[in-house]
Image (tube, rainbow, N blue to C red):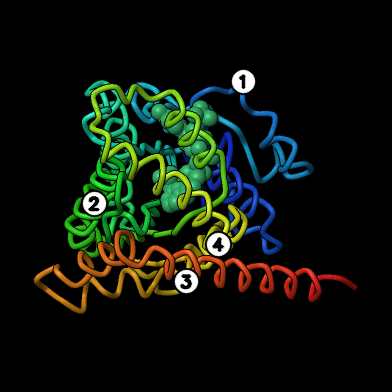
Amino acid sequence: MAVRNVLVTGCSSGIGLAVAVHLARDELKRFQVIATMRNLEKRQALEKQAGSVLKTTLELKELDVTSAESIRRCVDSIPQRRVDVLVNNAGLGMIGPVESQNMASIQRLFDTNFFGLVRLIQEVFPDMKRRKQGHIVVMSSVLGLQGLLFNDIYSASKFAVEGFCESLALQALKFGINISLIEPGPVVTEFERKLYEEAANMDLSAVDKETLDIFQGFYMAYSKEVFTALGQSPDEVAEHTMKVITAEKPPFRYQTNSLYTPITTLKHADPSGNLPLSAFHQMIFQHDRLFKASLSLLKMLQWRKRRDMDYNKSP
Ligand SMILES: NC(=O)c1ccc[n+]([C@@H]2O[C@H](COP(=O)([O-])OP(=O)(O)OC[C@H]3O[C@@H](n4cnc5c(N)ncnc54)[C@H](OP(=O)(O)O)[C@@H]3O)[C@@H](O)[C@H]2O)c1
């Protein structure tokens, strides 16, 4: 099979970096990776992890998903503009009470998470249709399937991504192009650190006391616990992404974290939408001790899983 050109966005850190390196290190050398980032001054982490594959199966280019011109420049620089696989990964997070968030930041998030995807598709989709092949892999989230307290804006951007892809996938199939939505749960990356940093600097002066107590006293405390209990590493997500890219029949939706599946399943069990709403409401506001106990149990299971994995790796 011919080597496939894979363009990955947002490779300065986290999942994008891990996906780019995993694909470039493929033992069967099935991929030529075009790892992109908006600011090449942040290249060091990627270059360090890429090591010997740098400038062989991995090349680095500048691409800002909020600029159609930047995307065009990058794609034009690829021989025959050939992008066989697009991994749309670049994204921003946002947490907090909606009344504390300013419109400019909300629009910036949508400009990156949703319009960034649309710009990329506008650039590569016509070429893929002409060639009658291609694979568009989109880093969505479980929050693109199920909303979560104080994640209103971020979740809305991922719902937009999911609706867009679900519609486009029909046309894509007609041209032999696959679309795959990867839906991770929490992943321990810079994303989490940036969220907490932004939350610490947020202007919460317009927020009522009860909401503040829920956000600061409950959400912030438990969010860190959830990342520890359920969080995956970027490498784990990259391995799942590799499976999706190399699948003979790539799935349209793919959740990377089985611990999160019961939560998204609730939604499909009740078309009225009341079941997940009341389950979350009870878990958060009425049975928070049970919630805390479940997190402790999950943390222990995660610890055992990692210990077993380390044990199996050792010679
Ligand atoms: N971490 C999680 O818990 C989690 C869970 C589910 C889904 N996801 C999704 O996974 C994707 C990657 O997130 P991550 O966890 O790896 O976070 P991350 O470490 O913060 O990486 C985000 C990447 O996106 C880049 N980016 C932001 N704006 C950009 C722009 N305008 N143009 C090009 N690149 C831009 C960042 O570049 P800079 O360094 O220049 O800012 C960075 O390289 C996101 O789409 C996120 O929504 C994350």
Question: Around disc 1, counting alpha carbons within 10 Å, would you say few (fewer than 14), some (14 to 19), or many (20 or more)?
Answer: few
Residue type at tag 2: Phe
Is there any visible trace of residue 206 in the rendered image?
Answer: yes
Closer to the eye: label 1 or 3: 3
Please, is residue 302 above or below residue 96 in the view?
A: below
Closer to the eye: label 4 or 2: 4
Residue 1 x %, y % = 55, 65
Residue 229's mark?
A: 4
Question: With 254 as the anchor, is 101 left or right in this view?
Answer: left
Residue 173 x %, y % = 24, 64
Residue occupied by mark 1: 41
Q: What is the quadrant of residue 14 in the picture?
A: top right
Residue type at tag 4: Ala
What residue is drawn where x is 61% and y is 49%?
18
Residue occupied by mark 2: 159
The answer to the question of whether label 4 and label 2 lie on touching residues, with beta carbons closer than 8 A, is: no
Please, is residue 224 above or below residue 179 in the view?
A: above
Residue occupied by mark 3: 259
How many marks can you see?
Answer: 4
Measure how far apart labels 4 and 2 are at the Cα level.
Answer: 25 Å
The answer to the question of whether label 3 and label 4 lie on touching residues, with beta carbons closer than 8 A, is: no
Is there any visible trace of residue 79 in the rendered image?
Answer: no
Residue nearer the viewer, 223 or 214: 214
Of marks 2 and 3, which one's residue comes earlier in the chain?
2
